[in-house]
Image (spheres, grey):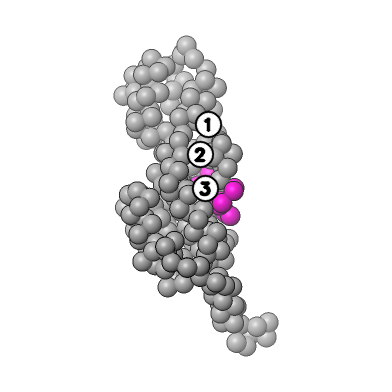
Amino acid sequence: MQITHLFVDVGGVLLTNGWDTALRKQTAEHFGFDVAEIEDRIRDSLVVYELGRIGAREFLDFVVFHKPRSFTHEQILEYILSAARAYSETIDLIKRLKSRYGLTVVAISNEGRELAIDRVTRFDLCGYIDFFAFSSFVHLRKPDPAIYRLAMDVSQARPEHSVYIDDRPLLVQAAETVGIPTIRHKDADTTRQALAQLGLDLQNGRWPGARRRVRAALAAQKPGLDGSL
């Protein structure tokens, strides 16, 4: 298998998750409210936020500010954003593979708009990611197969020359339904081993001109303007 495109989740793979269960509990303790009172509200409004239908302030209005609080929207949002941390070993792995094999790297992630923009900026994701299929940008959300198809279309990827990395089994399975080979991420080392089995091996020599050769082969298969091969 000659891989040209690497599709990767963000939360749980490259960075810590957004406002997940653990961070919600931590946030509630920090600001002094009961996390149990917001869980139903989170479930009812998170999808709408991640699809980009509402902004962070409206989301927080639904979830937290349905009653008077002693803190502000800005304070709680900054607390959530600043809690993000990078998984440096996985990021280094992706960067090295991109450099060695000339990969196109595409992020596919369920992220609210404000969180997505902050994470791209704070962690310089543009430094090694070529395309961003964030749910709030494209108004599609994993596990909808359409978001994977869109990511392939935008990046001009062929599923048989791609691989998708995610830490959640359901989202791995969803990618498989559109024909993309997948890796269930547990940690940087096991993902490195799985990628090596697909030919993306940092221990071996460089794969000279591989991406160029694959693209030329794909172009040769495309019909010409007159419909001939």
- x, y (%) of residue 195? 39, 61
Secondary element at image label 2: loop
Secondary element at image label 1: helix
- x, y (%) of residue 179? 41, 67
- x, y (%) of residue 92? 48, 49
Q: Is residue 177 in view?
A: no
Q: Residue at x 49, y 15 (%)?
A: 71
In this view, the mark in front (1 or 3): 3
Around disc 2, counting alpha carbons within 10 Å, would you say few (fewer than 14), some (14 to 19), or many (20 or more)? many
* Side of 127 relative to 14 (left or right): right
What residue is pinned by disc 2? 112
In the image, 202 versus 181, the foreground residue is 202
Q: Where 216 sits versus 33, above or below?
A: below
Using the rendered view, name the quadrant where residue 11 is placed: top left
Q: Where 58 sits versus 65, above or below?
A: below
What residue is pinned by disc 3? 134
